[in-house]
Structures are given as structure tokens and as C-alpha cells.
Image (cartoon, rainbow, N blue to C red):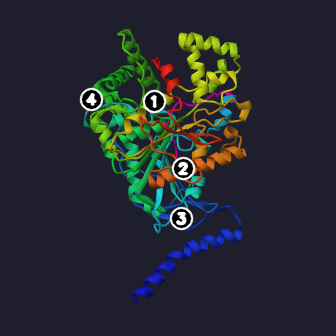
Amino acid sequence: MKIKSTFVSLLVLSLPLLAVAQSAKETASPIVAGKGIATVSTESGSVRGYIHNGTFTFKGIPYAKAERFEAPTKPDSWTGVRSSMTYGPVCPMDITTTTNDVIEFPFHHDWGFTNENCLSLNVWTPQATPAQKRPVMVWLHGGGFTAGSSVELPSYDGENLTKKGDVVVVTLNHRLNVLGFLDLSAYGEKYKNSANAGLMDLVVALQWVKQNINQFGGDPNNVTIFGQSGGGGKVTSLMNAPSAKGLFHKAIVQSGSYITSFTESALMKQVSAALLTELNLQPSQVDSLQKISYERLNAASKRALKKVSDGMKAEGKPTFGLGWGPIHDGSFLPYQPTDAAAIELSKNVPLLVGSTKNEFTPFNPATRDITMDGVKENVQKKYGDKADAYMAAVKKAYPETVKPSDYLDIDFNFRPLTVKQANGKAIPGAAPVYMYLFTWQSPVMDGMYKAMHCMEIPFAFDNISRCEEMTGGGKEAQTLADKMSRAWIAFARTGNPNHKGLPTWPAYTAENGATMILDNVNQVKTNPDKELLQIVAGKSL
């Protein structure tokens, strides 16, 4: 009887899925949506998404709620089934009123709609049942710590990656700028968590994943966090947060290795005090900050940042890094990234890290149509008696260098910091580090975009067709996207990016400098640009 009962239960559970499959087959429609379709239970209540080309898709699911400047808490529960088919609101930020047409073209931004109640996430899964434990890939969006969202770029869509790798993809929104990083801890217990509220949102989102993702077919014990630019900075920050330990198991930082230290709380408390002054508020009136409009708060916060910055300059102190971002508050972030205790926190987390060849340099019109004589003059001014060595080092690092601009528009900001992060993580007894350098050159707009900032994202997500304005959508792009996305998937599955489509990718060490060059020809090079980076940094060879 027990066997028969179990069989009947399984049959009943499978009927909705069979009905969905049959419905999709009969209608031949890429979209399947409606009552009883793609419905999943979460701790807060049931959600209903839709199925697109066989992928179960859920958008705008609340993972938390929060009062302004306070720690996030679990979302309110609901009864019935919550429709979750469209993206949720994004955190308020500076409004975009104009764009540079040529620069905007490849990005194709979607600015979304803003609301401070923005703590929601999106899920893509091959099958919304707990029957199979799939790797989970949680994407943290770019935009620094001040802007951006999970819907901002078409490359962020998780469907193709889900389909390609039989993985569950999660993207999310969280608090940014003054809403996420205003340190009000000097003004009472109520605001003790304000300094890193935006990062605490990410931890709560990962807690939601741990508690709910099995219902979507994901494995809560195999979670990879990955992000680009500011998203990479968020990955780095979470690797240094004790409260995030154990909520993720692998990490990928794409063009985001710029977090070398966290801003000290004492400095950000000066900003908070200046903000109160700007708004003519006494410390006893701090609660008023929870009620004023975001527009007024945002404007005053900018004046406060400038006031503190100007004061530091007058005292001869460096102001680099003064802005919204992770704060060394002694609690959420108790250590600086180079502290032994911080390194120990993420010692067992495998890391995949890299950057693009050009990053922001293609946006500089001064080098776009430069002549070879112009290049030599520029290099002579910058590097003096190292000018010839610089030119030779460029050709050695990048043998494909042909156009004059190729000598000047190489990124020297993200790449050295990427090497620094990899060197700091690749220590004896630690989980492996894998390094890449994305050098593929976009053919769009006569090749002006090159391997610019964000260019690798559609390749990692296998979203070339969604991002044709950026990649051109050609066969070479599709081929590289297949190889890259499979590497990201392999890393999420096992902590190792190797697969049959790429040459053997050895783990990185400071000594071997093993770097996978991601281009039309993929190859591993040893310290491919070491001499070049040393010249730029002003070190002797």
C-alpha cells in the first residue's frame, strides 16, 4: 500500500508539469503563462511566474523589507499566489536625463522604475521543482555602489545561461548610494546597521536563496556569487563579511577588483554630520532623515560629500575613494581586506577573476584616430626614457597590435588591481584562483568599442543575440560566448572553469601568472603583460 500511495502522490505532483509541457506543445508558443503555471512555494507565500522557451522565469519576488537606514528583515508574508512575472522596482538614484548617443548605443540601458521598497530578486530555472539540485549563480549588478539594477542591461537576462548549463540564475536589486551607505551609527541603536545596509541586503538575499532556492530546483549548498564592475566590488565585499560566510561557495569578480580597502567609519561619520548640517537638522532630529524625500536627501548628501572632500583637500589629505560604498564599521565589515582574519574568511572559496583589455579607454576620443607620430609623442611624454621599452612591451603582451590607438587604449586601472587581488588570494593551502583577460574586439561602429567595460558580460551569460549592438551578433562572438559561458558554468558547478572547449586552464599563482586569454583564439599565457604593467607602474624591469 505504501508503494502504491507513493506512486499516486508522484503522479499527482507530475500532472501540472505534464499539462504545462502539453500546453506548450499544443500552442507552439514560446510563452506559457496562466493559472497554475510555474507556481512555487516560498517561506513567505506562493509565487507564480511564467515559462519562456521552456525556462521557468520569476521576477520581482520580495526577499526582504527595510525601513530607511535600518537593517533588512524578512518580507511580509502573503496568502494566495503572488504574481511574479515582471521586474520589481530599482533603488532610487540620479535620474538619467541625457545620454551620449554613440556611447549609449551598445549598452541599451533599461532604467526601470524606482521605489525605495526595492528588495526583490529574479529567478530563472530549467524546472521549478526540488527534484534536482542544480548549481545556483547569483548575479550582483554593476553601477558601483550608487546606481544600476538587475534589469539595467540586456546581458543580465538569465534564461540562456540557465538553459546552457542546467543551472539556476538569480539576479537582484538592493539599496544603493545614500540609502545603502549613510553611516548614522553615531546617532543611536536604531541606526547601528546603517553604514552597510546595502550590503546587508545582499546577505539577506543570499539567506533567501539558502532557504528557498531548493523549491526552484537549486542547490543551496552550491552557490556562486558573480558580478561585474561594482558587482565585482560587492562580491569582494561579501568575501570579507563574516555574516555572508557559508551562504556562497564560489566567487567570480569581473572588472571589479578595485576594492582594496574599506572606507573608515570615522570619515563617513563626518559625511553624516555634514548631511545633518546641510538639512539644518540637530542630531536629536536624525529621525527626520527617514521622512524627507529622496530627492532632497540625495542632493544634500552630495553637498555633504563635497564639503568633507574639500576639507580633506585643504588639510592635504587624499580624497580618493570618498563616496558611497563599503565601510569598515567594525561589525558587518570588521576587517580590512588585507587583514589576516579577512583573508581567512574566504580562504576556501575558489575565485575566478579578470578584466577586459580596454575597459573605459575606448571612450576617450583623443586616442581614437591618433596617428603613429601622435602615439610616439604621447608615450614619450608619459614614459620618457622607457618609451621604447613601453612600445616593445605592448607588442609582446598584445602581438595583434596594429592600429596606432592599440598602443594607448590599454586599460591600466582594472588590470593591475586584478593581479593584486589574485596574488592576495592565491596563497598556500587556499582554494584555487583562476585568472582571465578578455581581449576580444567588437566590430561594431568600425571597431571603436573594442574590449570595453561590460563587453564580456553577454559572453559570460551567453546573451550575444540580446546584445547585438554591443557584440555585433556575429559567428565569432557566438563561438566565444559558448566557450566562456561554459567556463563560468563549470566553475559554478565544480570550482574549476576547465571544459573541453578551452585549452587547459591552470590555477593562477603569483609565480606562474597563468592567464586565460579570452579571444577568437583562446590561449593560456604566463604573466602575459608583466613587463608592460611594470613600466606603467614606474618600476624597473
Relative horizontal placement of residue 91, taking residue 206 as reference (left or right) = right
- Spatial CA span between label 3 and label 4: 48 Å
Residue 518 seen in this snapshot: yes
Residue 396 position in % (x across, y down): 59, 27
386 or 305: which is nearer to us? Answer: 386
For the residues carrying marks 2 and 3, which lies nearer the camera in this image?
Answer: 2
Above or below residue 205? Residue 406 is above
Q: Which mark is residue 417?
A: 1
- Spatial CA span between label 1 and label 3: 39 Å
Instruction: State the quadrant of the N terminus.
Output: bottom left
Residue 437 image-quadrant placement: top right
Residue underneath mark 2? 487
Q: Amino acid at mark 2?
A: Ala
Local crowd size for mark 4, using a 10 Å CA cut-off: few (<14), some (14–19), many (≥20): some
* Mark 2 or 4, nearer chain start: 4
- Provide the secondary structure element on which disc 2 rests: helix
Residue 76 seen in this snapshot: no
